[in-house]
Image (cartoon, helix red, strand yellow):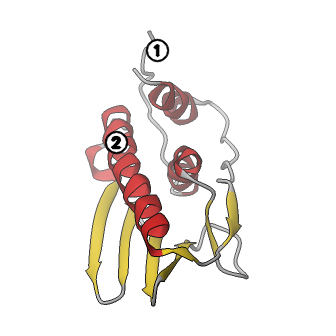
Amino acid sequence: MTFFMHRLAEVLGAEEPTEAPQPTLRPAAAVARNEGTDRQIALRSFAEQLVSEANAVITDPTSHLALVDEVGGDELAFTITCRNHAARVSTHFAGGQTIGQVISDDLPQGEPQELAGPEALPDLLIRLVVVAGLHNEQRIHLS
């Protein structure tokens, strides 16, 4: 199992509710088109890996995470859902620049924010799992 899978298994198997981690965010800022596109692709690719790993650890198939892509117009985006909780990660294209953003009812609201990088995704997914109230009744052996 990966480090992320171990971490998620510990959260899901905890006897006491776990505090939802806060993913590292930064103010959304315009960057060059190629840089923003590269960031979005890196986030999307890593998100797919983490969703797959999470679903291998979550024992209830009806509580599995889902990853949905949105392509069209002037934006690339994907949404990760866990039960009725969701986080949408997008990159908006305008002229020669892009602006990234993460939106979730489970994150602080205010000025537009984006994930600080792919390293913020594990906390985002674990946050979704915690706020959705997932809990594995059976313990997963961490070996």
Please name whichever residue, 110 or 32, is drawn nearer the observer in this view of the structure: 32
- Sequence order check: which comes first, mark 2 or mark 1? 2
The one of 9 and 70 positioned closer to us in this rendering: 70
The crowd level at tag 2 (other Cα within 10 Å; few <14, some 14-19, many 20+) is: few
The residue under the point 50% across, 50% down is: 125
What kind of residue is marked 1?
A: Leu
Residue 61, horizontal then vertical, whole percent: 26, 45
Q: Is residue 101 left or right of residue 5?
A: right
Q: Which residue is mark 2?
A: 49
Is 68 placed left or right of 99 in the picture?
left
Image vertical order of residue 83 relative to residue 52, above or below: below
Q: Secondary structure at mark 1?
A: loop
- Whether residue 19 appears in this view of the structure is yes
Residue 112 picture quarter: bottom right
Question: Residue 110's image quarter?
Answer: bottom right
Disc 1 crowd, CA 10 A, few/some/many (<14, 14-19, 20+): few
Say whether residue 106 is left or right of residue 52.
right
Asked if marks 2 and 1 touch (Cβ < 8 Å), the reply is no
| Residue 31: image location, x then y, percent | 57, 73
For the N terminus, the quadrant is: top left
